[in-house]
Each structure stands twice: as C-alpha cells, then as structure tokens.
Image (tube, grey):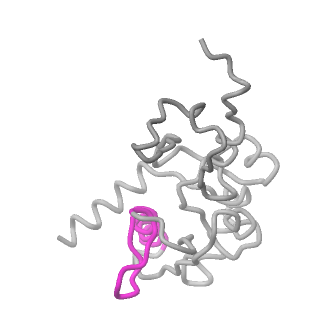
Amino acid sequence: MKMMQWGAAALALGLVHFAVPAEAAGGKTLETVKARGVLNCTGHDGSYLGFAEVDDKGNWKGMDIDLCRAVATAVFGDPAKLKIVPISWAQRWPSLQSGDIDIVIKASGGTLSRDTELGLQFSMSYYLGTTKVMAHKELNLKSLKDAQGGTICIPAGTTIEQQVAAYSPEDRNQA
C-alpha cells in the first residue's frame, strides 16, 4: 500500500503543473521552502468537495491536498512536511505573491493576464472542467436564455465568474 502511495505521488509530479511565483524558475521559492522545512500549500476556506475539504477528524483530504502532499514529498521526501493554508478563491493570488503560500493547487485556470500582470508562472493543467449551469427540473428551462431574471451562484474571484458575466443571452445571436 505504501509503495502504491509513493508511486501515485511520483506519477502526480510527472503529470501535474502548478501556479508559482515567476521567481520560482530561478529557485528562490524552492530555497525558501527548503530553509523553512515545510511547504505552504493552498487549502480552501470552506469545503470544496473532492478537491480540498476537512473530514470529521480535522484532516485535510481531496485531490488538491493529495497533490500538495506529492510536492512536499518531492521536495522533502516526506508528505507530512506540509502546511495547508485555508484561503478563498480571491486570496490565492495575493497570498502567492506575498509569500504566505508557496504554490497554488486550487483548480485555477492559467490565463495570459495572470502570467503577465500578476507575474505568475503557470504550466499545464492537472484538471480540466467546464462551466455548467444547473436549475431545478420543474423550472423546465431549455437554455440559459429561459432563466432571464434568475440568479446564478458561483465562486467570486474565479474565471468562471468572468465567463458567466461575459455570457449574456440577450447579446448572442440565436439561430
């Protein structure tokens, strides 16, 4: 079982890339992490089921948390050398830039503006998701256009927020 966990960590490191400060390419972030003796990685300030959540015993779990452990294992050889820092979506970039966290593993999209304006370094995605809108079946909606005047709940500070705000059924040509 232990070998399987280590194998999964190694596989994750081979397939996964993250958002880190641009200076990380020069090694400053890695030097800081090694000197501190612990990796500060993103958690969530609520519950993000399947990605970053706290179980009934107070332990962090989820895909993002497992990836944080994999990075800690790669750096220190020990997945326990990890501090999970619970932050909101809006806090992830300022926390990374300030050095409060060392790496963002938080289902976040890399964009050109985040690379250039925020000075972050993104790499390949580890999870690809789509933006979906759900409604109660009894509303009998066939498209988002049918939901005029409705409310959509989404996480603030995310690219999903931008995508939904940019989509306006009134402005689209309906064929």
Residue 98 magenta: no
**Can you tell which quarter of the image residue 163 is in?**
top right
Query: Quick one: 151 or 73, which is closer to the camera?
Result: 151
Which part of the image, by quadrant, shows the C terminus?
Answer: top right
Residue at the farthest front position? 138
- Residue 47 x/y as whole percent: 48, 71
Residue range of the region highlighted in magenta in the rendering: 50-75
Give me the residue at 61% from left, 58% from top. 155
- Residue 105 x/y as whole percent: 54, 61
- Residue 57 x/y as whole percent: 35, 88
Which part of the image, by quadrant, shows the N terminus?
Answer: bottom left
Residue at the farthest bottom position? 57
* Image mark count: 0
Give me the residue at 62% from left, 50% from top. 151
Query: Quick one: 65 or 87, which is closer to the camera?
Result: 87
Judge whether 46 appears above or below 135 on screen.
below
Judge whether 94 appears above or below 107 on screen.
below
Judge whether 31 appears above or below 130 on screen.
below
Residue at the farthest right position? 117
**Can you tell which quarter of the image residue 97 is in?**
bottom right
- Residue 38 x/y as whole percent: 54, 81
**Can you tell which quarter of the image residue 78 is in?**
bottom left
Residue 62 magenta: yes
Residue at the farthest left position? 1
Judge whether 20 appears above or below 170 on screen.
below
Give me the residue at 47% from left, 43% from top. 128
